[in-house]
Every structure is written in C-alpha cells, then in structure tokens.
Image: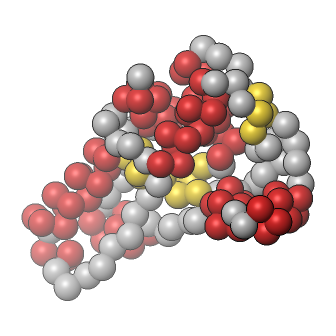
C-alpha cells in the first residue's frame, strides 16, 4: 500500500471514508499485516538505485513497515478527530460473508497478509524509511481532506 500526501490508495481512501461517515468496521479481531511505503521513500529508493553501482542488475522490493488495517483505522480516527466504530468479528465470518455475497476478493483484501522483506534494499543500498509510521499516516489522511 502506497501512502503519502496526494496518494489515492483505494483501500486507504475507503477506510478513511468509512471512519469519517461513522460506518461500523469489523476490524478489532483482525491481525493482518500489510506492507506500506510512503511516496517519499519510493522516490528515495529510486534515487539510490540510480546513483549506486551496487543496484545494477538488481531487483528491489521495499516497504517502510507493516501495519494492520485496525492500526490504519485508529490513525485515521485520531487525525480526523472522530470516533471509529470498530467491532470484533472473526475472520471466518468475514470470509463466509464474502463468499455468500460474491465478494470473496474483498474479504481477502481485509484478511490476508501482504508483507514485504526490504532487507536487500536496506543492506545493499543503505535505504531506510524517511518518516515514522505515524507521520506517514497523518500526512496521508491530511492529503484526503
């Protein structure tokens, strides 16, 4: 998930809209981990690849960190100054609901882990995230307003 000012990530935008509208979200029991990277970190990694000879003929994947959708919703809540209506619902119930309604792909988006190992970029190029998780989330929410 790419985050930052001006980035229109569909999942992030959907969560922000749901929190803003006080829609109930079944995120309290979810323990999923999703990789995110800020726009500025992508630019920095691309620059390092362009100027560092060690990057020649290499493929890099990178993420600033991993975050749960529950953490994202709480950060949106904090930045917007509204209360997110989060409630517990077991993952299997969400998957069943997705299957019954023909929205299995959306259930997977909510429940599945998408993690990235940035070790290669960090060790070979000395790359590291430029902002903290809270800074990136705050900037992303402000960019939606």
The answer to whether 115 is drawn above or below residue 130 in the figure is below
> At 65% from the left edge and 16% from the top edge, which residue is drawn?
82
**Between 81 and 93, the one nearer to me in the picture:** 93
> Picture coordinates of residue 28 (x, y %)?
81, 42
Going by the image, does 36 lie left or right of 86?
Answer: left
Q: How many dots with numbers?
A: 0
> At 76% from the left edge and 54% from the top edge, which residue is drawn?
31
Going by the image, does 103 lie left or right of 61?
Answer: right
The answer to whether 14 is drawn above or below residue 141 in the figure is below
Outermost residue toward the bottom? Answer: 57
The quarter of the image holding the C terminus is: top left
Going by the image, does 26 lie left or right of 19?
Answer: right
> At 42% from the left edge and 34% from the top edge, which residue is drawn?
140
> Picture coordinates of residue 23 (x, y %)?
71, 30
> At 50% from the left edge and 69% from the top edge, which residue is drawn?
117
Can see residue 40? yes
Outermost residue toward the top? Answer: 81
Residue 101, quarter of picture: bottom right
**Between 128 and 72, the one nearer to me in the picture:** 72
> Picture coordinates of residue 122 (x, y %)?
37, 63
Can see residue 108? no
């Amino acid at each position: 998930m790419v985050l930052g000012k001006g980035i229109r990530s569909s999942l992030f935008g959907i969560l922000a809209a749901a929190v803003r509208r006080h829609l109930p979200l079944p995120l309290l029991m979810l323990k999923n981990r999703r990789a995110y990277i800020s726009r500025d970190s992508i630019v920095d990694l691309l620059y390092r690849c362009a100027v560092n000879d060690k990057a020649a003929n290499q493929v890099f994947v990178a993420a600033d960190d991993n975050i749960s959708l529950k953490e994202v919703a709480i950060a949106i809540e904090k930045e917007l100054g509204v209360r997110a209506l989060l409630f517990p619902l077991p993952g299997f119930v969400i998957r069943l609901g997705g299957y019954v309604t023909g929205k299995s792909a959306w259930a997977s988006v909510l429940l599945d882990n998408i993690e990235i190992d940035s070790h290669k970029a960090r060790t070979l190029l000395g790359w590291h995230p430029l902002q903290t998780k809270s800074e990136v989330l705050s900037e992303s929410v402000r960019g939606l307003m």
